[in-house]
């Protein structure tokens, strides 16, 4: 599987979670579209590229199960959440209920919004280790008050790599009349996603992480009843266009000035790659490896898993709590001395290493990390 990717052979890449990795065939397709664009820029940007965009969207829509008319591509989930944030019309004193385990950039996004609008952003404390889904839900809903208007939550967390039970949250939020904004950056291509079934108000997912597209490809799904209320971050030609066959929501959001949207056009080839390599089957093997390795790595450093070691909470990543004297130096040492790319994450004042296992990850890669951590633990300077 490694041969299908552009990843350097000099490096053991155990950090798929941060920015993904793109197969060669998908990357070649990305270049193909860039060439098409450069060969006939005007026709591509105003005509053939748009047809290709529509076709590409069909493939993604099928996979995430929603209508093509209900989502548009964005460069990344931060752009998607900022678009929602700029359109929320909350009143002073209203509350946004979230958790204390959200992705840093989006945590800042809500902090910014809260300060500007005198709204309360509630980072509800989720204590670790999680004991069960019910335990999580009980902790989460403790943050609910009669001022809560919006729920913002990750479906898979960044630093801690946990799957949160968002389905149950969306169901209850609906009965309470709350707006649900789901950060599914890590979800598409990682665990099953069925937007129609989940039925959130807003959902963003990265395509360039676990779905394996080139960088700069994500999406924002918006439930129909919210589409008319959503202005794009960039006002461009779509604003003045009359309703077209496409519908003004998409016109409004899909045209935001001259840009290279080639990454958005790679969906057909991307899903073909996944089919040809039996990728989804391979992921099942990886998920089993995650369950096997998690307790072993924790034993190695004398820590405990932060959740039950089951597929309910774990996908293709796990986070091992570690005691380190210097997180940055630890990451650099693993990279420079052991040639291992792995994030040392921080969460709730603690540190952990987050390991991603994909079909391109060999057992030797995992064993190399295990040996490196064992060595550093025995040396006793960076890992206590
Ligand atoms: C939980 C979560 N949300 C959102 C993002 C998206 O970040 P960005 O917009 O910088 O790609 C990430 C990236 O790793 C993430 O882990």
Image: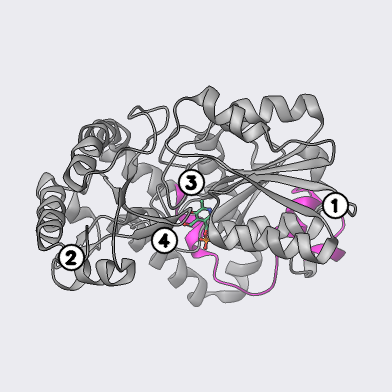
Residue under numbered circle 4: 214
Q: Are marks 4 and 3 in contact (CB under 8 Å)?
A: no
Question: In the image, 110: left or right of 373?
Answer: right
Mark 1 surroundings within 10 Å by alpha-carbon count, few (fewer than 14), some (14 through 19), many (20 or more): few
Is residue 255 one of those drawn in magenta? yes
- Is residue 120 visible in this depiction of the protein? yes
The structure residue drawn at horizontal position 59% and vertical position 28%, both measured from the top left corner, is 137
Task: Tell me: is circle 4 under 8 Å from ligand 1.
Answer: no
Q: Position of residue 122 (x, y in %)?
A: 70, 48
Residue under numbered circle 1: 243
Q: Are marks 4 and 2 in contact (CB under 8 Å)?
A: no
Residue under numbered circle 3: 157
Q: Position of residue 259 (x, y in %)?
A: 59, 72
Which residues lie in the magenta part? Answer: 238-267
The structure residue drawn at horizontal position 52% and vertical position 43%, both measured from the top left corner, is 60
Query: How far, Cα to Cα, is label 2 from label 3?
Result: 25 Å
């Amino acid at each position: 599987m490694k041969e299908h990717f552009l990843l350097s052979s000099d490096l053991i890449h155990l950090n798929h979670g941060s920015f993904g990795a793109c197969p060669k065939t998908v990357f070649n397709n990305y270049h193909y579209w860039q060439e098409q664009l450069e060969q006939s820029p005007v026709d591509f940007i105003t005509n053939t590229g748009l047809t290709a965009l529509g076709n590409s969207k069909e493939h993604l829509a099928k996979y995430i199960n929603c209508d093509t008319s209900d989502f548009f591509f964005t460069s990344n989930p931060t752009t998607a959440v900022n678009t929602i944030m700029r359109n929320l019309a909350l009143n002073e004193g209203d509350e946004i209920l979230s958790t204390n385990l959200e992705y840093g950039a989006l945590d800042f996004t809500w902090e910014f919004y809260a300060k500007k609008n005198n709204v309360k952003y509630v980072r509800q404390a989720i204590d670790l280790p999680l004991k069960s889904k019910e335990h999580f839900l009980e902790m989460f809903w403790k943050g609910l008050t009669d001022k809560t208007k919006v729920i913002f939550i990750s479906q898979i967390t960044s630093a801690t790599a946990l799957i949160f039970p968002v389905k149950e949250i969306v169901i209850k939020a609906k009965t309470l009349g709350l707006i649900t904004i789901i950060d599914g950056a890590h979800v598409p291509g990682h665990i099953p996603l069925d937007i129609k079934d989940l039925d959130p108000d807003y959902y963003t997912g990265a395509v360039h992480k676990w779905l394996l597209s080139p960088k700069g490809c994500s999406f924002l799904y918006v439930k129909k009843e919210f589409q008319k209320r959503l202005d794009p971050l960039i006002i461009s030609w779509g604003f003045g266009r009359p309703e077209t066959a496409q519908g003004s929501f998409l016109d409004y959001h899909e045209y935001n000035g001259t840009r290279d949207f080639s990454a958005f056009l790679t969906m057909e080839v991307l899903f073909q790659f996944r089919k040809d390599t039996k990728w989804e089957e391979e992921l099942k093997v990886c998920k089993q490896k995650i369950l096997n390795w998690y307790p072993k790595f924790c034993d190695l450093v004398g820590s405990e898993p932060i959740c039950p070691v089951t597929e309910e909470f774990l996908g293709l990543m796990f986070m091992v709590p570690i005691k380190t004297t210097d997180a940055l130096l630890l990451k650099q040492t693993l990279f420079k001395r052991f040639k291992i790319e792995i994030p040392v994450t921080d969460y709730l004042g603690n540190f952990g290493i987050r390991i991603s296992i994909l079909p391109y990850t060999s057992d030797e890669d995992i064993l190399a990390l295990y040996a490196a951590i064992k060595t550093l633990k025995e040396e006793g300077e960076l890992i206590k």
